[in-house]
Amino acid sequence: MDILVCVKRVPTVGGAITLTADRQAIDTRAAGFTISPHEECAVEEAVRLVERFGGAVTAVSLGPAAAQEQLRACLALGASAAVLLETADGVEAGPIATAAALHSVAAAGPFDLVLLGNEASDTGDYQVGIRLAHLLGRPVATGIKAIAVADDGSSLAASRTYQGVLETFTLPLPCLVTVKEGINRPRYPSLPGRLRAKRAPLTRLPVSESLLSAVAAADIRMRALRVPQAPRKQATVLGHGADAVPALVGVLTELGVIS
């Protein structure tokens, strides 16, 4: 089966988040880039399905030229081909424009399955997968934690847990599925895989800013980002040595630890 996996270049943020001066983006000068954990699992799931049923995995991303790094990471994990829908540096596309751009690739190939992460880790808008499925006219299941393809390759069962209840949907192929982290454990790329990914050809298709702006005319526009204030932590010194014991007993009594 032929599978298309859509990924996005997102900042790697492991500590305090710092914004640019205009509050329009995260300052990534002290951070790297990656793809979100949901999308890593989508790539892994696609590779596993192809290992079982045969076929090929194509990774696609909408982003700047630097997003080639994330696509080559997908190639190192087992993807067969990669397509970059290249935008100018600093151009951000909303979910409507992103889905429209991805549709140009998804509709052009004979893909039995299109996989996405349930949401990107930077925006978390949950929209692209559903919008892309609508444009393709294909059935869609979201928030999926398990996929089982029928032996004859005609359909798949997609499962998720909602409010403690297991839900399983049967979708005819071709279809679109968005997956969540935990559906599998992504593999680490091997050294031969990394070397092969560096030499592999990568298709670059320019996407004009005017096209994205035209498609996204009705899109929601971001005004500014704001980093929420971190909760303040305060410590109270109860005393020193044996003099602190009565105060400590009082606190433990108040908390119900002792009575």
Image (spheres, grey):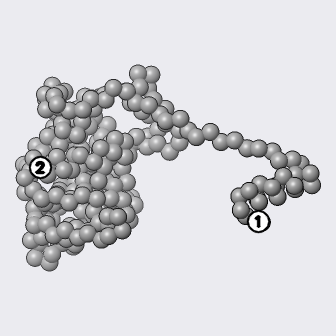
The residue that mark 2 highlights is: 134
Tell me the residue at 82%/58% (across/down). 249
Front position in the image: 237 or 2: 237
Farthest residue to the right: give it: 242
Above or below residue 189? Residue 203 is above
Mark 2 surroundings within 10 Å by alpha-carbon count, few (fewer than 14), some (14 through 19), many (20 or more): some
Farthest residue to the top: give it: 22
Above or below residue 27? Residue 118 is below
Tell me the residue at 13%/28% (across/down). 214
Of discs 2 and 1, which sits in the foreground?
Answer: 1
Between marks 2 and 1, how big is the CA–CA gap?
Answer: 60 Å
User: Is residue 146 something that shows in the picture?
Assistant: no
On the image, the x and y values in percent for residue 159 come to 26, 68
- Mark seen at residue 258: 1
Question: Looking at numbered disc 1 in the image, what kind of residue is underneath it?
Answer: Ile
Tell me the residue at 40%/61% (across/down). 188
Question: Looking at numbered disc 2 in the image, what kind of residue is underneath it?
Answer: His
Q: Quadrant of residue 204?
A: top left
- Mark seen at residue 101: none
On the image, the x and y values in percent for residue 230 come to 56, 38
| Quadrant of the image containing the C terminus | bottom right
On the image, the x and y values in percent for residue 258 come to 76, 65
